[in-house]
């Protein structure tokens, strides 16, 4: 189920005889739910998109658009049977194949929110996230006393795919709650150190998978405790990376404190003398996220898309990939240079010049 506390759906009539939008107000942001248009228009857009992609999905001819939208994919369990919160191992692998072929390249969550996206020209960033730290995300198998990564767990699948496709970076963030993330008490510290050593990230999912909209979290100290203590614990277990800071929070159940005045404690706070700071706060559902240099971007309310086939209400990862097949000009396309921000001239108003991170703006004259 996509949780969406404040839902307003607007639709515009087909009688306008032009592409129309169905958009929805969800968790403080507008999300495009569906778009119509004639079959001919959709076919033309799809054909144009396919025609310019090479075998590796890189398209130097697809014009850069660095205020286009980005998919932040949300996984939970990786298992044998597809369920509402479980992706099968085979479907997860085929997600990676499809993302790769369609020109998506993983970037770290923090590189995305801090506008340091560095991928080849013609490709699109994608952020991979996993919530809840189940054992099927990262399982250790002992062989002759030595730990090896279970190749059927999410980390094993990601590593194997990266080994076969070195230009598909090993970037993912695992949001963990409680004292035994990934379910094997013997390997807690080993796993966290392993992820960070490989360039992946550890994120915060509170101490007790806490639903922050409940009345018991109406006091600031309570919110700061469940976030701050979890960050502190994860950092303590990262014995080989003493300077690593846990800097992202995924909201459990997608829920925020009821009172907006308390939301600031999601991004920063203090508990028992320990200060935490979250550069990114992630929602649950339900559409693509704005580019980091876009006026619509809010790092403390980042939407994610469900990477699942069940219960997504046609708002899952595959549905959004089809959406970008139809409307490639809505998708973030990199210019391949972090020092420049290339934007079609007609999208000039979408740029938030306070978020450029020293990049120089270059306008292109590509058609809308
Ligand atoms: Zn969760």
Image (tube, rainbow, N blue to C red):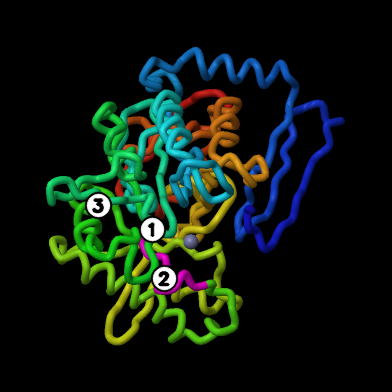
Q: Residue at x 38, y 50 (%)?
A: 136
Question: Is 30 located above or below residue 258 in the figure?
Answer: above
Q: Residue at x 19, y 58 (%)?
A: 190
Q: Is residue 258 magenta?
A: no
Q: Is residue 208 magenta?
A: yes
Determine which residue is flagged by label 2: 206
Determine which residue is flagged by label 3: 195
Report the front residue among 111 and 320: 320
Q: Residues within 10 Å of mark 1 (few under 14, many from 20)?
A: many
Q: Identify the mark nearer the N-term, 3 or 1.
A: 1
Q: Residue at x 49, y 73 (%)?
A: 210
Disc nearest the viewer among 3 and 1: 1
Residue 84 visible somewhere in the drawing: yes
Dot 2 and dot 1 residues touching (CB under 8 Å): no
The location of residue 110, given as percent across then percent down, is 33, 53
Instruction: Tell me the element at label 2.
Output: loop
Instruction: Tell me the element at label 1.
Output: loop
Instruction: Tell me the element at label 3.
Output: helix
The location of residue 33, given as percent across then percent down, is 67, 42
Q: Residue at x 38, y 15 (%)?
A: 55
Q: Which image quarter: residue 25?
A: bottom right
Q: Identify the mark nearer the N-term, 3 or 2.
A: 3
Report the front residue among 351 and 301: 301
What is the span of residues highlighted in magenta in the rendered image? 203-210
Question: Is 61 located above or below residue 266 in the figure?
Answer: above
- Left/right placement of residue 351 relative to residue 327 reads left
Determine which residue is flagged by label 1: 133
């Amino acid at each position: 189920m996509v949780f969406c506390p404040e839902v307003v759906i607007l639709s515009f009539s087909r009688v306008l005889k032009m592409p129309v939008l169905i958009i929805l107000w969800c968790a403080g942001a507008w999300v495009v739910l569906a778009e119509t248009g004639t079959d001919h228009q959709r076919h033309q857009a799809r054909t144009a998109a396919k025609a310019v992609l090479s075998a590796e999905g890189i398209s130097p001819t697809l014009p850069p658009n660095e205020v286009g939208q980005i998919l932040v994919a949300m996984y939970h369990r990786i298992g044998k049977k597809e369920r509402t919160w479980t992706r099968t191992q085979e479907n997860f692998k085929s997600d990676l194949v499809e993302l790769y072929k369609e020109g998506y390249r993983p970037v770290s969550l923090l590189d995305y929110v801090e506008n340091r996206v560095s991928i080849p020209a013609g490709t699109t960033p994608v952020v991979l996230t996993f919530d809840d730290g189940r054992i099927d995300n990262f399982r250790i198998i002992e062989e002759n006393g030595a730990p090896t990564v279970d190749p059927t767990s999410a980390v094993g699948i990601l590593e194997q795919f990266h080994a076969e496709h070195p230009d598909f970076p090993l970037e993912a963030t695992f949001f963990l709650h409680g004292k035994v993330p990934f379910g094997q008490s013997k390997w807690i510290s080993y796993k966290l150190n392993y992820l960070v050593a490989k360039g992946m990230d550890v994120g915060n999912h509170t101490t007790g998978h806490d639903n922050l909209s409940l009345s018991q979290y109406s006091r600031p100290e309570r919110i700061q405790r469940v976030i701050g203590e979890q960050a502190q614990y994860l950092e303590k277990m990262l014995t080989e990376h003493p300077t690593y800071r846990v800097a992202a929070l995924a909201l459990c159940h997608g829920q925020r404190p009821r009172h907006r005045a308390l939301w600031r404690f999601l991004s920063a706070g203090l508990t028992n003398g320990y200060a935490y700071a979250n550069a990114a706060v992630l929602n649950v559902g339900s559409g693509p996220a704005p580019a980091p240099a876009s006026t619509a971007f809010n790092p403390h309310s980042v939407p994610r898309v469900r990477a699942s086939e069940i219960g997504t209400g046609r708002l899952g990862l595959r549905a959004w990939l089809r959406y970008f097949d139809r409307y490639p000009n809505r998708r973030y396309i990199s210019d391949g240079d972090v020092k420049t921000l290339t934007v079609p001239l007609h999208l000039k108003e979408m740029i938030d010049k306070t978020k450029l991170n020293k990049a120089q703006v270059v306008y292109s004259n590509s058609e809308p």
